[in-house]
Image: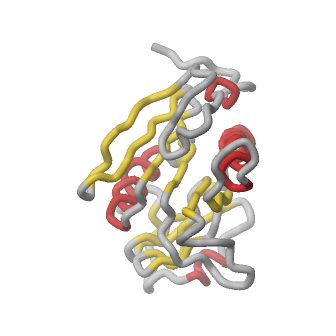
């Protein structure tokens, strides 16, 4: 069983996630219950910076084309996953005009961003990345704050195709948000350890 899978004597449910201590988060993918420590502050900071750079031009349509609903750590319920919560996710407004007030989101995101951390790097790459392809997420960003890299991929014929890698660019145009340049270099502010060769 892959880390951070939790063996259970019963099929996992949302009650298993609710029973986790406050410092833990859980997800269920293809009948397997995964539990991990909640992301640390620097991990959360990176996700917040990605989100903040996208909200005005794409979520609100200020200084950009709009047309997206972008949310941090949304709880998504899908047929093969009663609970999955990417670091940041987005939907085209024509598919999901607004976040449901009193119900879970049940639509596959059009874009997902996962921020890697030492405790979830394998899980995000080995378990979640292929799962996202299998459910039809069209774009995926993997943000690696240890390496100071953003890798963007698009789904083509059920497989991820790498679109590019960004690191120190101050005007990066990263699909599907390439209508507005992003300062990727700003996301690493506060990083204390430079990547080693």
Residue 65: x %, y % from top left: 63, 49
* Colour option used: secondary structure
Task: Determine the residue positioned at 46% across, 51% down.
Answer: 124
Which residue is the extreme one toward the left?
A: 157
Look at the image and tell me whether residue 43 can be seen. Answer: no
**Rendered view: 52 above or below 190:** below
| The one of 58 and 133 positioned closer to us in this rendering | 58
Task: Determine the residue positioned at 44% across, 29% down.
Answer: 165
Looking at the rendered image, the quarter that the N terminus falls into is bottom left
Looking at the rendered image, the quarter that the C terminus falls into is top left
Left or right? Give the position of 47 relative to 132: right
**Rendered view: 36 above or below 64:** below
**Rendered view: 136 above or below 98:** above
Residue 136: x %, y % from top left: 37, 64
Look at the image and tell me whether residue 45 can be seen. Answer: yes
Task: Determine the residue positioned at 43% across, 70% down.
Answer: 29
Residue 133: x %, y % from top left: 35, 59
Marker count (numbered): 0
Left or right? Give the position of 161 relative to 138: left
Residue 43: x %, y % from top left: 66, 42
Q: Quadrant of residue 96?
A: bottom right
Q: Quadrant of residue 152?
A: top left
Task: Determine the residue positioned at 63% across, 22% down.
Answer: 170
| The one of 193 and 68 positioned closer to us in this rendering | 68
């Amino acid at each position: 069983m892959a880390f951070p899978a939790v063996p259970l004597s019963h099929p996992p449910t949302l009650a298993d996630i609710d029973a986790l201590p406050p410092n833990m988060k859980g997800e269920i993918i293809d009948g397997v219950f995964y539990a991990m420590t909640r992301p640390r502050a620097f991990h959360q900071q990176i996700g917040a910076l990605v989100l903040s750079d996208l909200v005005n031009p794409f979520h609100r349509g200020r200084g950009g084309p709009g047309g997206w609903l972008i949310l941090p750590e949304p709880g998504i319920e899908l047929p093969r996953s009663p609970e999955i919560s990417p670091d940041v996710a987005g939907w085209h407004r024509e598919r999901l005009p607004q976040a449901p007030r009193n119900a879970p989101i049940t639509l596959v995101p059009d874009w997902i961003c996962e921020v890697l951390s030492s405790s979830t790097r394998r899980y995000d790459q080995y378990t979640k990345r292929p799962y996202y392809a299998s459910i039809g997420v069209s774009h995926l960003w993997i943000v690696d704050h240890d390496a100071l890299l953003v890798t963007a991929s698009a789904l083509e014929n059920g497989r991820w195709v790498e679109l590019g890698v960004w690191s120190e660019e101050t005007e990066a145009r990263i699909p599907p948000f390439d209508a507005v340049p992003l300062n990727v270099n700003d996301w690493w502010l506060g990083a204390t350890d430079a990547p080693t060769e």
